[in-house]
Amino acid sequence: MTATNSFFHPAFFYIALAMVLPFIRGRFYYWRWLLLVPSVVAIISVISMDHGTYMVIPWLGHDLILGRVDRLSIVFAHVFAIMSLIGFIYGFHLKEKAHHIAATLYVGGSFGCVFAGDYLTLFVFWELMSMASVFLVWLRRNPVSTRAGFRYFFFHAVGGLLLLAGLLYRYYAVGTFAFTAVDPSNAQFYDYLIMAGFCVNTATIPLHAWLSDAYPEATVAGAVFMCAFTTKTAVYVLARGFSGFYILAVMGTLTAIYGVLYASIENNARRILSYHIISQVGYMVAGIGIGTLMTVNGAVAHAYAHILYKGLLFMGAGCLLYAAGTANLDKLGGLVGRIPLVMIGYMVGAVSISGMPFFNGFISKTMTIAGAAHAHYTWLAIGLEVAAVGTFLSVGIKLPYFAFWSKPIYKGELRPIPINMYIAMGIASGLCILQGVYPNVLYNLLPYPAEAMKYHPYTAWHLVQSFMLLSFTGLGFYFMRTVIAPHPGRNLDFDVLYRLIVNTFAFIICKPLAWMDNIWTNVYRIFGMRGLLGLGTGTKWFDLKGIDLVVDGTAYTVGDIGGVSAKAQTGRLQDYLAWTVIVALCVFAIVWWL
């Protein structure tokens, strides 16, 4: 194994803490400070590492590369390290070790994927990430989250199997597990299998329903981690291996539009935000699919910005759930005066995701849309603009309006929000504003910095376009506020298709099997049962007349002989002499006769 002082794998610090944490004893107020250590070390490690290949481990004739460091891996590791610190600060008050162990393994798995230089290493960390994250759903400990966790695990198991099948088939074809970029013009079946496995984690339609199902049911702090790592790790591996695949551009744009449509009709705040993860990741997948330097830069920049503002939004929704005990908008209202800091933090994330100038969503989203237009993908650019309208309508206006300003005012008791949750929201808010005001803070980290510096988001046209879009969206909401008011209930998504598939499978497979089982039951009842009863009668007769007669007869004979013998044993000498004389006379008579 080779390594240098310029690379210390961040995943190892998280995994080490997860292994040590169960054995740490002492008061919660002491050991919880250890939760911040891996994130701080990861930040230092990421900003100090040099480009190159590190930690190459020979294994069964293959080289496992744990440390491939370049601009693409560093930018994702950079935001992962920052977001993990924010996430652990947000959950700093949680005393349950299981939650922190799951979170550290989850983050460690994401870092392992980012630096993996071969498919075997990627697969191991990919599955670690999948297995650890499901506990962030289950640890909410209610029947709904338990079922959602199982569905989440099932989807990721399917995605992992697609990835495994693809990488094994690829190894059989090319003889290597190296994780390299695929030429779209020369892609093979195994490449599409691998891409499909990645697309499960990007929640690209129609493989997306697991996200909007599971994320709203996760723990308050667990959802903050989940919104940041799973989908963005998948965006990284798509950018690494499948840039320029037009099918990704089309499906990404459709996903962006589809997500905002469903978000606009949802009632639960965290479910709305979950659909917007689907939509915003659609932007990233589209940028990667278009494959130009600008759109790939835009996809990566948007992933970085999205992790910050989406984490901030989930922290705001988590505060609503923590304080009021519900995140359903029809049960909230008028909370702006009771939790104003939560409202401010949430609105920073809301205007960021909506592409408001001077916030980080503006400098990343416009790059992707402009890149699509410059590459003459006009319809894709229009589709992404339409998705931007829906984003501001649902996340920027609808959710905060019905949670913080609408009437009737929520009169229930509010649980005090821990100070650490406010601190985490403050850090994320500051970073969203910093990147929006100083775009080069983000642009300098992108895979193609020279291309990024050519793009200027704060042009007169971009500003006018953005303000017009946001203004007309706000006006539209004013006239439609009674139409899109939240209502109790849950909207079925592609769940309908999944249920149709399962029911069809049950009809095709289970119905014939049930029919055959019915026939066999009748045959058995008519013939098999009677045969068994007849056999039982015969064995009973044989037992009584055969076995019992012989055994019992033998027993009775032995018993009679024993009885006679017992009577003959009188114990008197004269009786024995008499019997001796009688036997002797009998023997003499027989001998004489013969």
Image: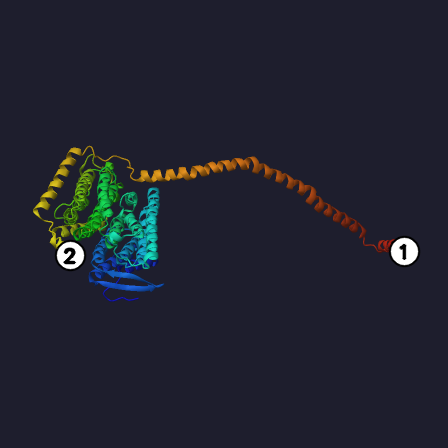
Say which amino acid is labelled 1: Val
**Residue plotted at (60% across, 38% down):** 533
The number of callouts visible is 2
Under tag 1, what secondary structure?
helix
Q: In the displayed image of the protein, which residue is found farthest to the front?
A: 185
Q: Which image quadrant for residue 116? A: bottom left
Spatial separation of the CA atoms under disc 1 and disc 2: 132 Å
Image height check: is 47 above or below 140? below
Indicate the amino acid at tag 2. Pro
Viewer-nearest of labels 1 and 2?
2
Lateral position of residue 562 relative to residue 246, left or right? right
The residue where tag 1 is placed is 591
The picture places residue 351, in percent across and down from the top left corner, at: 16, 45
Q: Is residue 392 left or right of residue 187?
A: left
Residue identified by numbered label 2? 449
Residue 332 x %, y %: 23, 38
Q: Position of residue 493 (x, y in %)?
A: 29, 39
